[in-house]
Amino acid sequence: MRSVLNRYTFPAIFQSRTCHFKSSPHFSIQPNPNSYHPNTPSCENPCFPSFLHLLKIYKTPSQTKQIHAQTITHGISPNSLIVSRILQSSDLNNSLLIFNQIENPLPFHYNSIIQAYSKSDTPELAIYFYLRMLGDGRKPNNFTFPSLIGVCAHLFAVSEGTQLHSYILKTGFDSDQFLRSSLIHMYSSFGDMDCAQKLFDEASARENVVVWTALVNGYSKLGDLEMARKIFDEMPERDVVAWSAMVSGYVQNGRFKEGFSVFNVMQGEGVKANESVLVSILSACAHLGALDLGRWAHLYVERRFGAELRVNLGTALVDMYAKCGDLCASIAVFEGLNCKNVLSWNAMMGGFALYGYGRGALGLFSKMLRVGLRPDGVTFLGLLGAFSHGGMVNEGRIFFEAMTDVFTINPMLEHYGCMVDMLSRAGLLEDATELIENMPLEPDASVWGALLGGCRVHGNIVLGTPIGEKVIDFEPDHAGRYVLLSNIYALAKRWDDAKHVRRLMKERGVQMRPGCSSIEVDGSVHEFVVGDRQHPQAREIYNKVEEMDMRLRMAGHFVDTRNVLYDLDEEDKELQLSYHSERLAIAFGLIFADVGMPIRIVKNLRVCGDCHSATKMLSKIYERDIVVRDSKRFHHFKGGSCSCMDYW
Ligand code: ZN
Ligand code: ZN
C-alpha cells in the first residue's frame, strides 16, 4: 500500500504555537461601533453576530485578515466559533498562525484547519492535522472525514484511506450517506472497484449522481469501459460531469470514435458542454489528427466560453492544432493566451518537437525563462525532441547537461531514449553506446531500441546484431523489435537469420502492430491498414494507387525495396510497398479531399524510406501539399521535398 506521510512531511514550523501576528493599523472593515464592548466575554460579545455577517460579505484573504484583527481588538477569544470560520476563509499562512494561537483547539477548529489544508497545494498536511487532533484526544466527527477522504483520493494514499475507512466503520459514521459517497469516490480513484462497487451496492440512496459518476470514472481508469458504460446507461439522471466522465473514459482509453459518439448524444439531449468534456474532445481530435473537427470544437469553445480562453482549454487547443498539423494556428492560440502555465508552454514545445523546429524551441525556452517559469522534465523532453528532429546535436548535448547541472532535473529514461535516438540517427553510434553505458538508470528496451534504429539506418550490422538480440530478450512481446532485427539481417542479405527471427516471432505468438493511416475528409475520419481492401471505395482507391505508381515510375522514382523484410522477388517487394497504409490514404485524399487543400495523414508507425521518397515525388507530381504525422514527427511534403530535410 502506498503511504504519503514520511518524516519530512511536517516541518518544525507547524509544531510552533507562537503567534507572530500583528494587527494592521489600516482597517477598512469595521463591525457596528454601537455594539463595541471590550470587556464583554467573547461568547457573549455583541460584536459576534456582526462579525459573522462581515465574514459573509467580505471573503478575500486580506479582508478576512482585517476581520480577524478586529476580533482581537474587540477581545473575542481565539477559541470561539467565529475564529474557526476565519480559519476556513483566511489564506493558509494566516490560518496556521491563528490555529497555533488557540490554546486547546476543539474539534470544530481542527475540522476548519483540515478543510483549509485539504484544498491547498499541500493537502498531505490535512492528514497531519488529523493525526494531531487524535493525539490531542479530540474526537473526529462526520464533518472531519469528507475532506480527509478527498485528500486520500487525490494523493492516492491507499494506506491512510483504508485506515480512515476502518475508523469510520468502528465509530458508526458509515451510515452517513455523504461519507459513503466520498468513500466510493476514494476507492474508485484507487482503482479498487471491488470495494467501491460493494459500498455502492449497499447504499440505500443511489440517486446521488456523484456516486454513479465516481463508479464510471473508476471503471474507466481500469480500462473496463464496458462496465463503465453499463453503469452510465443505468444512471437515473446524468449531469454534465457524468457525461464528461464517460467521454473522457473513452478518449483516455484510445476509443476516440466512441468518445465522439457519446459527445454527440450529449449534445442531442441539450446538455451544455463543460470545460473538461471539451478538453477530452480536443485531445481526441489531436490523437486522430482530425483538424476539421478540432476547428469546429474551437468555435464551440468560443461560443460557449467567449474568445478569451481559459488556461486548460487554451492549452488543449495549442496541443490539438500542433498535433493536427496546423502549427500556425497553434502558435496563434498560444500567443493569444492571457494566462499560461507550464503545461501550456510544454504543449507549444511539444509542437515544435513534432516539426523538428529546434531554433523555435530554443527561442520558446528562453522566453519561458524570461517570464520566470521553471521548466520541468516534460519541457526538456520537448526541447530535446525538437533538437533531435532538427538534427541539432550540439545543442542537444549542451541542454541535456544543463538539465542536471543548471536546472537540477534528473533525466528519466525518456530523456536518455531521446538523446540516444538523436546521436544514433546522426551516425554517432559510439557516442550513443557510451551514453548508454554510463547512464545511472538501467537502460530499458526503448533506449536500446533507439540505438538499434540508428544501427539500421547507418547499416552497422556488427553493432546492431547483438543489440537486436538483447532487445528481443528484453521485450519478447514487442513485434517492432523483431522486425528491426530481421531488417538488419535483411540489410546484410542474411536471409536465413532474418527468416529465423520471423519464425521466432511466430512461434512466440507475437502479433505485428499493423501500419495504420487515417485521413479526415469532410469531418469524418477514414482509416487504412496495409493492403486494406475493406473500404467501400476500395476499387477506386486501388486504381488511384496504380496510377500513382505509374506516374512515380515515369518521374524516375527508384523503389527502395530495403524496407520490405521478406525474402521476396524484387517485383513482389515493390507491390508490397505500394500498398503501405499511407499510400492508400494519399490515394483516398487525392480522390476525395477538396482540391487545393493539403492532404493530412496520421500514421501510427514511422514512415518507411520508400514511402518517404515516393510521397516527396507525389507532392510534386500532383501539386498537392501532403502533411504526414508519423509516430515521431511531422513531414510536410511540398513541391518534391520534405520539411524534415530527409532527416527523421
Ligand atoms: Zn512505407
Ligand atoms: Zn520527411
Image (cartoon, rainbow, N blue to C red):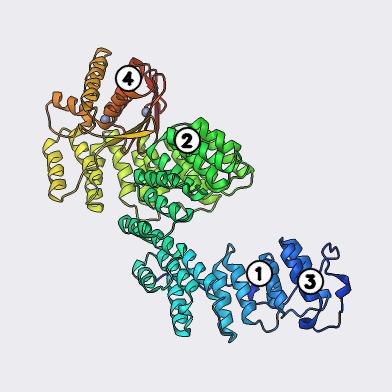
Q: What amino acid is labelled 3 in the image? A: Ser
Q: What amino acid is labelled 2 in the image? A: Trp
SS under mark 4: helix
Residue 50 image label: 3
- The residue singled out by tag 4 in the image is 618
In this rendering, the answer to whether 37 lies above or below 638 is below
SS under mark 1: helix
Mark closer to the chain start, 4 or 2:
2
Q: Would you say residue 397 is visible in this rendering?
A: no
Residue 71 coordinates in the image, percent (x, y): 79, 74
Quarter holding the C terminus is top left
Residue 283 image label: none
Of the residues tagged 1 and 2, which is closer to the observer? 2
- The residue singled out by tag 2 in the image is 296
Residue 556: image quadrant is top left
How far apart are the alpha carbons under marks 2 and 3?
52 Å
- The residue singled out by tag 1 in the image is 88
SS under mark 3: helix
Residue 432 coordinates in the image, percent (x, y): 36, 43
